[in-house]
Amino acid sequence: MTKSNLGRFFEDFTLGETIAHATPRTLTEADAALNIALTGSRYALFSADTFAQNCGLGSAPIDPLLVFHIVFGKSVGDISLNAVANLGYAEGRFLALVYPGDTLAATSEVIGLKETSNGKTGIVTVRTTGANQLGEPVLSYVRWVMVNKRTESAPASAGSTPSLKPNLAAPDLVLPGDLDLSNYDWTLAGAPHAFEDYAIGETIDHVDGMSVEEAEHQLATRLYQNTAKVHFDALAQANSRFGKRLIYGGVAISLARALAFNGLSNAALMLAINAGRHVNPLFAGDTLYAWSQVLDAADLGGAGALRLRLVATKNRPCADLPLKNEAGEYDPAVVLDFDYWAAIAKRR
Amino acid sequence: MTKSNLGRFFEDFTLGETIAHATPRTLTEADAALNIALTGSRYALFSADTFAQNCGLGSAPIDPLLVFHIVFGKSVGDISLNAVANLGYAEGRFLALVYPGDTLAATSEVIGLKETSNGKTGIVTVRTTGANQLGEPVLSYVRWVMVNKRTESAPASAGSTPSLKPNLAAPDLVLPGDLDLSNYDWTLAGAPHAFEDYAIGETIDHVDGMSVEEAEHQLATRLYQNTAKVHFDALAQANSRFGKRLIYGGVAISLARALAFNGLSNAALMLAINAGRHVNPLFAGDTLYAWSQVLDAADLGGAGALRLRLVATKNRPCADLPLKNEAGEYDPAVVLDFDYWAAIAKRR
Amino acid sequence: MTKSNLGRFFEDFTLGETIAHATPRTLTEADAALNIALTGSRYALFSADTFAQNCGLGSAPIDPLLVFHIVFGKSVGDISLNAVANLGYAEGRFLALVYPGDTLAATSEVIGLKETSNGKTGIVTVRTTGANQLGEPVLSYVRWVMVNKRTESAPASAGSTPSLKPNLAAPDLVLPGDLDLSNYDWTLAGAPHAFEDYAIGETIDHVDGMSVEEAEHQLATRLYQNTAKVHFDALAQANSRFGKRLIYGGVAISLARALAFNGLSNAALMLAINAGRHVNPLFAGDTLYAWSQVLDAADLGGAGALRLRLVATKNRPCADLPLKNEAGEYDPAVVLDFDYWAAIAKRR
């Protein structure tokens, strides 16, 4: 009996069980610097202690998306090592800021199990929670994946699919308690556009492009201690459907968010993830572009919040906002369709 | 009206205006480690707290060239996003050491504006200053770039070109106040050659070669939060004059300086940049070599200073010191011709 | 007379001399994070301060293999710049844990010199010691390399070959004094397998594969300040036997150890290196796999220790444990045959 972990198959999950994931991780200033080097992020809040202090915080916090990747990475070995596809996210809430020196650990509760009609796979839905060294939750989100069954069989009758909110709303959003944007420095932040300047429905082409190399996405995905084979094993991938390594979807999210600085400089702080879909695979050598649309807006008191759709494409600039054709099918250039809330400074 | 920043054109600059750049940056031990990983630098002063403490400092300072790249990077979005060419540097002075934990911000004063005769572009000259969280300047330098005009027109009559020093001299150089090289450890520094051992005119082949990959220069240039598109957007660059991504010139400077350790181990601390020219473009896949010549020497009391010409080539070793042909044209292998001052320990 | 270091030739070594190596290095949290990004290591002991504290330590120590690479890197400029081959390691002992903030320096004593029969090269054996800022040794190991002679000649008569232990034994192993595994958290460590669960002779296929890119091994090897030209100079290597850059053998060791987490999650702490052989070269583009065999076991009181053989292959999964053919020759896919001791938690 081997001691190697081959990953769970669909039959290995039990509805309601909670799985504690391995390898807690202390995040440090190095993770913040590597996040900048890997994405090109220029949001001042995560770049400068002075800027963060001017916003009421003790020092620059860790970018919430980096927190997401770290927590997600922990769950892979237990949840999705034998996943066929990562189908979606929902109900992602950032509950507390993470600072250099904090240690994160993660657990996942199985909240849905449903076999697919072909009898070969099933859909596993988990609610994953990341907590810091004090046990305080910093992030909670739901994701569902299609997982291979160990043994093919007729699908079981019922199965369970959890009821999930299509998107979070203002009352679900947690603004960090000490955040104080009353002295917000628009110049150092990079743009004058305040909460009040964004209209629901407004679109923004983020203009810039970023090409991705194998070494870059591998470095990022290993930094997240995400072990999914499809990102790292070129030999095995040579025989896969795509013939090459797939880039972890989170890399596309972080790169697109870094590009979105150009147009959304003041919307640094992600508060929630409503939904996310990796529409097409991203490969090394591709150049990523992005555009955004304002889907909703909410005044949270100490800050505004924008609900934003972030669309990323590969090898196709976004001046004409590519998304879907008339039949409702995604443009083949679209790799990401992501729906989130971010805090943004109000003018006063 | 889009919220994306498309960059300033020549007409958008006003002589005498001061532009405060976005995204302050707290430098940390991680930037120091990444600088080593990205360049291979072995200067002991920036590598070991103990060595720096033995030189009178509190801990290992940040390599001044890294400070330069960080400050330079901040200015790109405001100054050179629509630049056709980065033409030169002058009067670069390192004014105070930067330590992990310091936060840098940058401003640029427009000190020269002159349209070129073709009516399509103009030359913008700025003096950029980087300051720490106390507002103390740590670096000041002049650079001039050729910037596209928004609208082609006949060139305006006069224009303004600032008067700049061809090079800095000993009185311009600032030796850190607490630097004390009286117990300098030549063994740990890696070579016995003191200030007194270098003769004006002397040349040094730095022997080693370093190949550069796309992922490496992209990581470095993103770490500097430099957003110039030519370094990152392979798709757009495919239609450019070169057909591929250009490596940020600062990467060539830092790699060449890291190679220069082999022959200049004790000249770790850059004090001033007299001039710099990126003679030919550097691309991923190229192998960089370098050689130096001692142009001048000055005894600053607590240390010596050498004025050094640093020449870097691509895909051509430097044993025969390649530079220019008889007609005064650069050898096509030369990528960098850089003129700087560095402090160096005296024998006693 | 050039000031560049061209490296020592065989004739430049004296039996019994001690060489102090250049460029001390302060290791920081950034080195720990980069080690994770470069290898994908998931051993909890090096990833989380909380986990390390639960094991009696003050915070997460630096992975001993990273300490090895840093110390090794310092020795390259003095010992192996003109090496034809790195022949072997022996008697490697990790003597004290290294923590972020510690500064390492290295010295090597020449303990063996023997010319080879062809008159062109000689074998230099050194005992290299890494020490921290207090002068306490943290690592000691022997390695021998084949070094070019400056002048070809008939080999000298005798020469000296040191007597080395074929492997270290339990009394040679140093368990960190404050290590206390009585509250060991098997869940966060990632697997339930304790010292008692491993049988001598047992083999483990580590299953996963990791592809290596040029940028990745160059970043790692520069982080170690290892300057061996064969890893970096693509132009010079184009004319070498292999026609391309060679990956530093230590990169293969670290990647294989990171893969070995899958099956040896609780054997994080390397205590000793008995022997190591880089059987075949590893190149960028190769995918690395690994398997292990338990060679011996020892109860050290506060922890168990396993003597492990770690075999890494390129472009060939290890399910059938590839090693040697019937003639005793290594399988051409094998790149590493490494023999070490690691501490592992006991069940009680």
Image: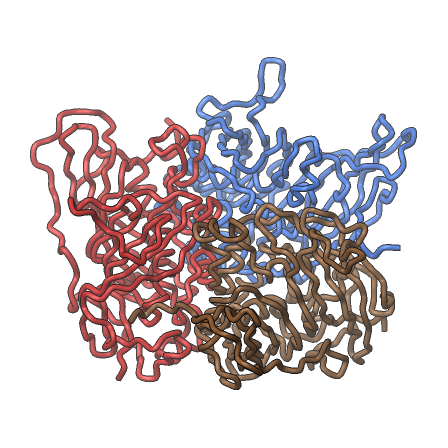
Chain colours: A brown, B blue, C red
Which residue is farthest front? A154
| Residue C125 seen in this snapshot | yes
Which quadrant holds the C terminus of chain C? bottom left
Q: Residue furthest left?
A: C157
Q: Residue at x 58, y 50 (%)?
A: A283
Whole-percent x, y for residue C322 in the image: 26, 52
Residue A243 in the image: state x and y as whole percent: 51, 49
Instruction: Give the side of residue A25 with respect to residue C255, left or right.
Output: right
Where does residue B138 sit, x and y in percent of width and height? 64, 52
Q: Is residue C70 in view from this perspective?
A: no
Left or right relative to C142: residue B181: right
In the image, residue A144 sits, relative to residue A14, either above or below, namely above
On the picture, is B234 further left or further right than B111?
left
Residue at point 57% right, 53% down? Answer: B97
Q: In the picture provided, is B181 more to the left or to the right than B79?
A: left
Q: Position of residue B163 (x, y in %)?
A: 77, 33
